[in-house]
Amino acid sequence: MQKIIKIENGVTRMPAWRLDTPVNIETLDGEQIAIVGKNGSGKTMLVSIITGVHPLLKQEPIYDFSPSKKKLISENIKYVAFKDSYGCDNDRSYYLQQRWNQMEIDESTPIVGKELEKAFLQAGEDTPERRKLQRDIYELFHMEHLLDKYIILLSSGELRKFKLATTLFAEPRVLILDNPFIGLDSDTREQLKELLKTITSHKKIQIILVLSKSDDIPEFITHIIEVKDKIVLPKKTREEYMDSRPPFPTQVLSQEKIQAILQLPYKEKEYHSEEVVKMNKVCIRYGKRTILKDLDWTVKNGENWALSGQNGAGKSTLLSLVCADNPQSYACDIALFGNPRGSGETIWDIKKHIGYVSPELHRAYQRDMPAIRIVASGLMDSVGLYVKPRENQYEICKFWLNVFGLEGLEDTSFLKLSSGEQRLVLLARAFVKDPELLILDEPLHGLDNINRRLVKDVIETFCKRKNKTMIMVTHYKEELPNCIDHSIFLKRHI
């Protein structure tokens, strides 16, 4: 049997990227693999060894990519990490409000169709067979209506479709996808699973999925490699792994921490309005595209809303209006905490009372500063922190890091944390100022089963406090906490 990837006693030269024991794995032709493990367990470290990003001390990985004619490892192995990036992956010029700011768009701004065509032509010959592949991908992902859209205006889910399409054009021998299903609505998730299954049955390709959600393993996956506490465990069949998988926890947050959250002192200056959000006939357009049309929506004090809809339906746009991150919010009839937008309050007056986390916020945090300073930035409503917090502020930051299971990581720099740990830090940032309004846009992105349950426990506990209102977006119904009592569904305008 052909061994596509073989690693024997793999130890990276760089100590910072070493797992706790040498890596021994092999993947065979015909196998489709899922790499699973908790947040921070070492999944990304294993991928860096497989792809050759971090060289090994002794024997490098052995590859057999036949029947591929491509010579380079980078041509045969494609890795897509699905970071919420709207331009270059290393674009440090991105800022939180950029997606909503039309003033940032000019003739040089990349357009989806042009970038996809460029990627298609760079990936191989322009043959009828490859053009059919291109059409099939467009049709499966419903991308036709996106082709004339600026990349910076794509929703988080639409951006994942774009990145997947550009990668699939290259027809790699090994395709590694890191948490490919997060941010996709339920229909698109099923379409992607079916597409990957179809590709594996028609192409000489090995797919390796890196998954935090162990209940997200598609049926076409044949084998599982689990990474646990920085140790790569022996490969198992899908059936063996599913039979031995621990049950989903019913509660993770301790009673002690539940009581500590409920007993937190309240702030002196709080809004106590009956209506927290009120929108009248709100319309948002970008060029010829209508995102929101004649939307009436009222969120009352103490309500907990689930906001849902297809990718590109305008969920994040709606939340950007509430947070005053969208310049068009001042042209709309919107009142927040009983105050009409534009009546004299500043953006900072608004943000003092809102806790917020989203894929856009995660994308905007590219500064490699200690985790505790990221949390403290929530007290200042800034992305990046330039004022040193007082000692009592550091204590509340430590408290919320502890609530989210991050004790001991206070001084670890943000970019050295795993993606899941980063999301937990940003959640701590959202809760740290005890906000009256909590806005959670895909808060469980990339979290493992235990941390998903932990975050739900924290949300359910927090919403029991007085004068708390919440709006939450998720594409997984099972991620919604029990405290949800209202819902709104947005339809995409074509």
Image (cartoon, rainbow, N blue to C red):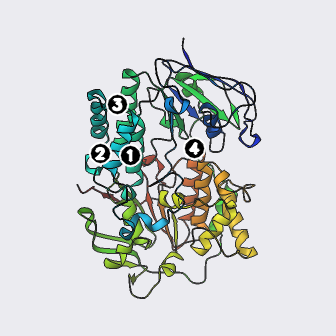
Who is closer to the viewer here, 170 or 392?
170
Seen at 47% across and 54% down, the residue is 442
Seen at 60% across and 45% down, the residue is 450
User: Residue type at mark 3?
Assistant: Glu
Callout 3: SS: loop
Res 484 visible: yes
User: Residue type at mark 1?
Assistant: Phe
Task: Classify mark 2: residues with Cα within 10 Å, few (<14), some (14-19) or many (20+).
Answer: some
Who is closer to the viewer here, 243 or 135?
135
Q: Residue furthest bottom?
A: 344
Who is closer to the viewer here, 203 or 346?
203
Q: Which residue is mark 4?
A: 448
Q: Which residue is mark 3?
A: 125
Question: What distance separates the C-alpha of mark 3 from that of mark 1?
Answer: 20 Å
Question: What distance separates the C-alpha of mark 3 from that of mark 2?
Answer: 22 Å
User: Residue type at mark 4?
Assistant: Asp
Q: Which residue is mark 1?
A: 162
Q: Which residue is mark 2?
A: 143
Q: Position of residue 313 (x, y in %)?
A: 31, 56
User: Residue type at mark 2?
Assistant: Met
Along the polypeptide, which appears first: circle 4 or circle 1? Answer: 1
Along the polypeptide, which appears first: circle 1 or circle 2? Answer: 2
Along the polypeptide, which appears first: circle 3 or circle 4? Answer: 3
